[in-house]
Amino acid sequence: MNDDHSVDAWAVSAESADQVSPSSGSGTAKRAGFSQPRPILRSRVFLYVTEFFSGMAVMAAELGASRLLAPYFSSSQIVWTIIIGTIMIALALGAVVGGRWADRNPDPDRLYLCIMAAAVWIALIPLVGKYLIILISGLLIVAVSTNFLVLAAFISCLIIFVPPLFLLGTITPGLVKSATDSLDDNASVVGRLSACNTVGSILGTFLPTFVTIPAVGTFVTFLIFSGILLLVALVYFLSSHAHRLACLIATVAFVVSAALSPMTGFAFWEKGLAYEGESIYNYLQVKTLADRTILSTNVLFGVQSVTMKHPGMTGMYYDTALAAPLMADQARSALILGMGTGTYARQLRRYYPRMAIQGVEIDRTISDLAIKYFVQPSDIPVSTYDGRAWLAASAQRYDLIMVDAYQDITIPFQMSSTEFFNLVRKHLNPGGVMVVNMNMIDDGQGSINAALTNTITRIFGSDAILTADVPQTTNRELFARRPVSEAFAESGGLKKAAMRDYPGSDLLAEAASRVSPDPDLSQMMEQVSFRLSTVGNAKGRVLTDDNAPVELLGMHAIDGIISREAGPYRRILQQEGIQGLIREVS
């Protein structure tokens, strides 16, 4: 049978039912709810169109889920695993249940009601999703002491995304039932439906990432694809003048969400943000305070970049990292991998004005914000590139290399391995220094800092490395010096690299006074001197390109930080109950 001809599978089923039970007349068909075939389904084309947009909506919702959760829980591989896993479970359950529904009652009306319900649910996600995430996070942060991010992301995904994806999972079995009226061509029909679903999924993958999210953001992206899905259901019902009340309610719900969702951002409690938006890589938030302007790439954790409204130290890890040029034999050139809005570059320019600086930043939107909000010097070149790929393509060497590459709260695995740090070392001049910002102070066997330190020690040697914790932050700076001599021990490690014995001395302060007349630098270096410590030989995990579970290690570090910060609130909850906790936070 050709696709252009009538396909009234439910009518055929009803007729068969009447033939099997003649005493019941047409009552069986009427009770089944499909005695009146819809004119729009006289051709299979609309069924194929439905499958196409259903597949598109599934992938768009999945990518939207990652962007909705990322500002709160990061966009690490762990969060992606949670999203993909829960959505696949929802689709699998939907397929099983949808198959049973289609066998018991192959009524297309119920099929398109499921589509309409899924469309409305997805449309409401921008309006209520962020509030649910904060509510879930608030409850868990005082209720659990381990795996907070994993549990919070999983429960959020379960509540927000499983219901609509379950409904969309029921669609394909129902469409197969409606599109098939003969065993002669059922395989061809299933194949075409599968192809439509796959092509729709392809577009649902590429369009949000490269078009809608960068152009109009995550919230509007949800509305666009839910609107398309809703339109399919409305065309079906309105063409037959059926379920008008359901169509009206669904349309009103969509319009309300479309009108209200863009009015609040991810950080809906923040007032007076200078900028809130999204790029291909990040959620971005610019906040102007009395003494500084800050950039955040995550709602719940940390500051990515800062510029001070008055000259001086930032009070952040950038100040400690200013010791790196003083540890190098020369301080004529610097490379910053993870330029951000140029905080470290501005500090270097202020205290080491003769230094040539090159920045590398993967997110072009951040570089644009640096010019607009952060007084980025126009004479500092910034390449829009992945840091490791940039090193692989460049032959230039530097006296100083700053590694400050963090995506949300996790370091990219490809910038944490022995292969990467060996590449960095090759781009250092003899006597040059690499400084690495380790975002989370997390010590002990199996911690992320231990793994990073072991990895760098394997490349530079333990005698070439010093670390310094940054007061009142969760940061630690690691300094590694490339020796003037390139001799290697037979074991493959470096011979003694002659990193100067800075701890407890005034050498850094004296050096700072020689290179800059600003007393702020000397005072800071005096403080850094007493925070410097040496590291031992590498023992334990060493990260490689093949095995660098930095997301998992980072999650453990975040758990520790959250546990320490939430400990007092957890005790209040245990001792005084929910009312005591409300009094404390209000």
Image (cartoon, helix red, strand yellow):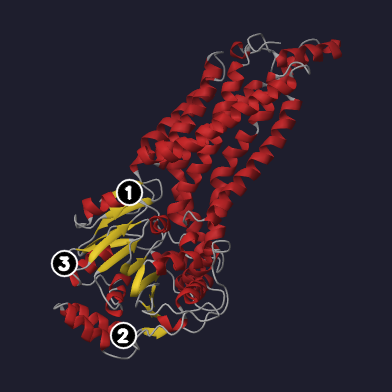
Total residue callouts: 3
Identify which amino acid the numbered label 3 is placed on. Answer: His
Residues 105 and 523: in front is 523
Identify which amino acid the numbered label 2 is placed on. Answer: Ser
At horizontal 40% and vertical 67% (from top left) the residue drawn is 426
Residue 533 x %, y %: 40, 85
- According to the picture, the residue beneath numbered tag 2 turns out to be 529
Please tell me whether mark 3 or mark 1 is closer to you in this view: 1
Residue 386 x %, y %: 40, 54
How many other residues sit within 10 Å of disc 3, few (<14), some (14-19) or many (≥20)?
Answer: few
Label 3: element kind: loop
How many other residues sit within 10 Å of disc 2, few (<14), some (14-19) or many (≥20)?
Answer: many
Quadrant where the C terminus is found in the figure:
bottom left
Marks 2 and 3 close (CB-CB < 8 Å): no
Residue 1, above or below 389: above
For the residues marked 3 and 1, what is the alpha-carbon distance in whole angstroms? 26 Å
For the residues marked 2 and 3, what is the alpha-carbon distance in whole angstroms? 25 Å
Residue 229 x %, y %: 51, 28
Residue 116, above or below 139: above
Say whether residue 457 is left or right of residue 511: right
Say whether residue 249 is left or right of residue 197: left
- According to the picture, the residue beneath numbered tag 3 turns out to be 310
Residue 54 x %, y %: 57, 30
At horizontal 36% and vertical 79% (from top left) the residue drawn is 484
Say whether residue 89 is left or right of residue 328: right
Label 1: element kind: helix
For the residues marked 2 and 1, what is the alpha-carbon distance in whole angstroms? 36 Å
- According to the picture, the residue beneath numbered tag 1 turns out to be 364
